[in-house]
Amino acid sequence: MVNSKISVIWLNYNSKKFLSLALASLNSVFDLDVENFEIIIVDNASTDGSFESIVKFVNSEGRMRHKVRIIRSDKNRGYSGGMNLGWEARDHDSRYVAFLNNDLIADPDSLREIVERMNAEPDVGAASGLIYFGDGRTIYSAGGVVTELWNAGGVCHGAPESECSGRERAHYVTYADGAYMVARVDAVRDTSLKRPFLDRAFFFFDDYVLGLMLWNRRWKVRYYPVNAGLHFAHKTLRSEINYYGIRAHIALMKNVKTRFETLWPFYLLRRSAIHSGLCATGRLGSCSVVRALYDGLRLGSYAKNRIGILELYKGPYIRSTCKELECFIAGICEDLKIMHRDILINNA
């Protein structure tokens, strides 16, 4: 039985093209099997009419029994800024805050089960459950892990259940997956930001930074074998995924200390040289990469001033292989699939 007050933040931006899915996602929030919770809907200044459709949905019959707050931002603040708006609007009696994307359909029992487990482990600052892709068979995330070469990804991302042995047991992870994660309010307040995310991060430099901040403050982050729901990923952010992914990767290099910290400037110079040359020949994709590299440097410098240098080895991580190191030095690394096999835990 969960008696702790919970705030659930659900974030929307221009969801008209997948409105039926967004409304199904929001409906799954209303259907969560938890007694004492409030719903905070944050709209990131949508311009496509989806905000009006959501308000109409909320005001329809049967949903007024819930405590709902609707916040409309003055601009698109991305995931980090939008979720921070919801965080600031939460009921200050809330002990937990759940963050949900508008393309995720939550399982009715998921929030209650995650919070029950967190109640039993008071040193856990954030947690997430087993998230599937929309097909209900392929795993989106069994928690998130960061590698020594600053790649972040979901455990067993893209794998069938048969290839993810760790999904059936609780385990420590670097971070809880931001598509649907639960954070303990006291733990977030204990970080240097005093809030979940860095507003300027916008996209991607968010859930794993929170996880690292928590581990660096001696909180723990857990994956629980709870069926969290279905994630129909990247419905909002399709065309700019590559830019924000590169930007976040570079920012993480500048902000997170690992044994390879002396190598990242060489990676940056090599990759910048390659794509600057291609950009000069009219390759627009390479121009976007160059912009992402230098925007990532600026974001990393800003984050360093706000939250300081974070140590990867305070919590779980993945040791990078010789093959990964070779491609990193060559400046051609791509994110590699992160399976459960080799998560290392120093201080959990």
Image: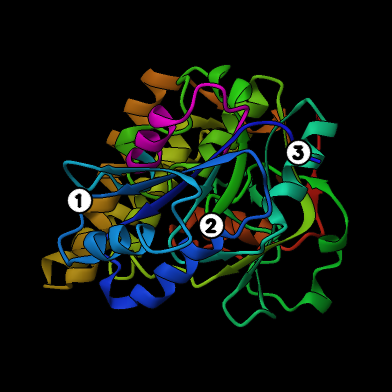
Question: Disc 2 on helix, strand or loop?
Answer: helix
Percent of width and height locating residue 303: 38, 27
Q: Are marks 3 and 2 in contact (CB under 8 Å)?
A: no
Which residue is located at x 63 percent, y 38 percent?
A: 36
Q: Relative to 193, is 274 on the left or the right?
A: left
Q: Which residues are magenta?
A: 81-97
Q: Which residue is mark 2?
A: 30
Given residues 197 and 303, the one toward you in this image is 197
Name the N-terminal-most of marks 2 and 1.
2
Amino acid at dot 3: Val
Circle 3: is it few (<14), some (14-19), or many (20+) Cα within 10 Å? some
Which residue is located at x 85 percent, y 33 percent?
A: 120
Colour mapping used in the image: rainbow
Quarter of the image for the C terminus: give it.
top right
Amino acid at dot 1: Ala
Is 274 situated above or below 252?
below
Amino acid at dot 2: Phe
Which circle, 1 or 3, is nearer the viewer?
Answer: 3
Q: Quadrant of residue 20?
A: bottom left
Which residue is located at x 58 percent, y 38 percent?
A: 260
Name the N-terminal-most of marks 1 and 3.
3
Is 28 situated above or below 126?
below
Q: Which residue is mark 1?
A: 45
Circle 2: is it few (<14), some (14-19), or many (20+) Cα within 10 Å? many
Q: Is residue 88 magenta?
A: yes
Given residues 204 and 264, the one toward you in this image is 204
Q: Which residue is mark 3?
A: 2
Q: CA distance from mark 1 to mark 3?
A: 34 Å
Percent of width and height locating residue 244: 34, 54
Q: CA distance from mark 3 to mark 2?
A: 17 Å
